[in-house]
Image (cartoon, helix red, strand yellow):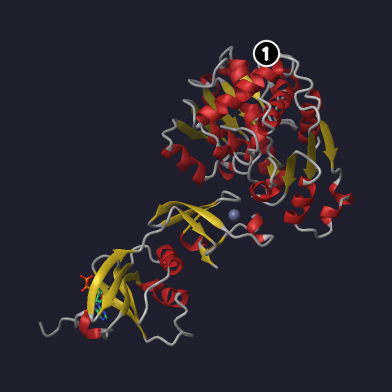
Amino acid sequence: MLGQGGSVTSIRDFDRDEIVNVLAVAGKMEAGDHYGLLQGKVLAIMFLEPSTRTRLSFASAMMKLGGQVLDFGDVEHSSFKKGESLSDAIRIVAGYCDVIALRHPWEGAARLAAQIAGRPVINAGDGANQHPTQTFLDLYTIQKVCGRIDGLTVGFVGDLKYGRTVHSLATALSRFDCRQVFVSPPSLSVPQGLLKELEEAGVEHEQSEDLRGLLSSLDILYCTRIQQERFADSMEYERVKGAYRIGPRLLAECGVKDGLRIMHPLPRLDELSPALDETPFAVYFEQARNGVPVRQAILAMVLGKV
Amino acid sequence: MGGEPPSEELSVAAIRNGTVIDHIQNEATFKVAEILRLDGAGEIVLVAMNLPSQRVGKKGIVKIEGRELTAQEADKIALIAPEATLNIIKNFRVVEKRRVELPTKVEGIVRCFNPSCVTNQQSVNTCFEVLSTSPPTLRCVYCERVMSGGDIILK
Ligand SMILES: Nc1ncnc2c1ncn2[C@@H]1O[C@H](COP(=O)(O)OP(=O)(O)O)[C@@H](O)[C@H]1O
Ligand SMILES: [Zn+2]
């Protein structure tokens, strides 16, 4: 179980019970005021790649628990950019703080950092690999808006090839009894490795290009951005984008469940119509808010305060 | 029987004491020899290829006089020739025979094929979880990428 001194580098390290435990602590964080729990503790925010939401939500989580934040600021102006090795930088920063939130373009950076820091390291994104606090907040949101995780059908739509949030969430959901549906153009479909992993875990899953045909079976629709850079041909980009644009009309035409909830890691482009924002389907802003209690829980757990 | 190819015993010379690596997939034969750094060593080495084999089509055999393999060498062989067998020879007799076998973790001997992996950016001892042994499939403990077959590059 995640506890004092533990690091959070990859969702892969968490089995079902451990995930459930983190979500339960996050629930307690959200339900009450825990100011003072991390008094005297310092979180170092060491981001060597741009981020606004993750950085602010880590800072907010620490402040809400009465802890202090040491933010290394913009990478461009920090000495870490000037060829200092990651290992050296981590050892030095570890001396200034009690816990480190690290975002780094090298994949596996957080795992390495956790081995040498002598302090808990929380992975806030390592290149295209992992972003476990995002996965925890996604799971927390699903549980909160559906009241459970088991028994749900979760559909992923958009760029399923490069979207790391999708890969991590699919891995995490494989620890639960969920049906998973992947909707994307063939050029952006989920990696074979992930499908194989789901097969080995005995997860019921389906792959399709056809969003309309699948919408009515979903409890959760997890959308991701389709980026133009992924397409050589801009006509093809426009076509794909149009086919996966979600708005109130499409939902009505497809006869979706009343309980359908739509998530998105944000920021969105035009894959989600703003006309959805005020409907009960939209939970993406709530999802973003849930980053705070989830990060409060993880900070408190690795600092041994829960 | 006149048209039959000669048996292996006849086609490949005998050694007194040492190791015979048998059932090497034909194409991997020279890689096995390379792993063992046999060219620089003083030991007598016999390398044979294109031998008929029921198990792996055509096979290679590498024989080394006078020594056994280190655990690391055996792991490397398991990665490139997962079907290979190791025969320990004492006084011209096979006294021990076993399949090469990958441990559950492979440390230090493989390079990660992902250029963005932290292990390719600074000096870190690589470490891979073994997902399957034949064909060998590895997951990098750092970047979590899965590699098999030709993606597996020995250091
Ligand atoms: N004294 C020796 N010198 C060199 N090679 C040997 C010797 N004894 C056995 N071998 C070789 O080692 C391998 C294993 O030997 P053995 O156990 O007799 O055969 P098999 O595995 O085909 O039943 C064979 O390729 C054989 O040719
Ligand atoms: Zn790697």
Q: Is residue A230 above or below residue A146?
A: below
| Residue A250 horizontal/vertical position (percent) | 63, 21
Residue situated in front as seen by the camera: A233 or A48: A48
Count up the numbered dots: 1
- The answer to whether one can see residue B85 in this image is yes
Quadrant in which the C terminus of chain A appears: top right
Side (left or right) of A212 relative to B17: right
Q: Is residue B79 above or below residue B48?
A: above
Q: Residue furthest right?
A: A77
Ligand 1's quadrant is bottom left
Q: Residue at x 51, y 27 (%)?
A: A17
Q: Residue furthest left?
A: B1
Q: Residue at x 73, y 43 (%)?
A: A102
- Indicate the amino acid at tag 1: Pro
- The answer to whether one can see residue A282 in this image is no
Quadrant in which the N terminus of chain A appears: top right
Q: Residue at x 42, y 73 (%)?
A: B32
Q: Badge 1 sits on which subunit?
A: A
Residue situated in front as seen by the camera: A226 or B122: B122
Mark 1 crowd level (few <14, some 14–19, many ≥20, 10 Å Cα): few
Mark 1: is the Cβ under 8 angstroms from ligand 2? no
Q: Residue at x 61, y 26 (%)?
A: A22
SS category of the residue bearing label 1: loop
Residue situated in front as seen by the camera: A117 or B50: A117
Q: Is residue A112 above or below residue A151?
A: below
Residue situated in front as seen by the camera: A121 or B115: A121
Side (left or right) of B5 relative to B155: left
| Residue A229 horizontal/vertical position (percent) | 72, 47
Residue under pointer 1 = A280
| Residue A93 horizontal/vertical position (percent) | 79, 47
Side (left or right) of A177 relative to A212: left
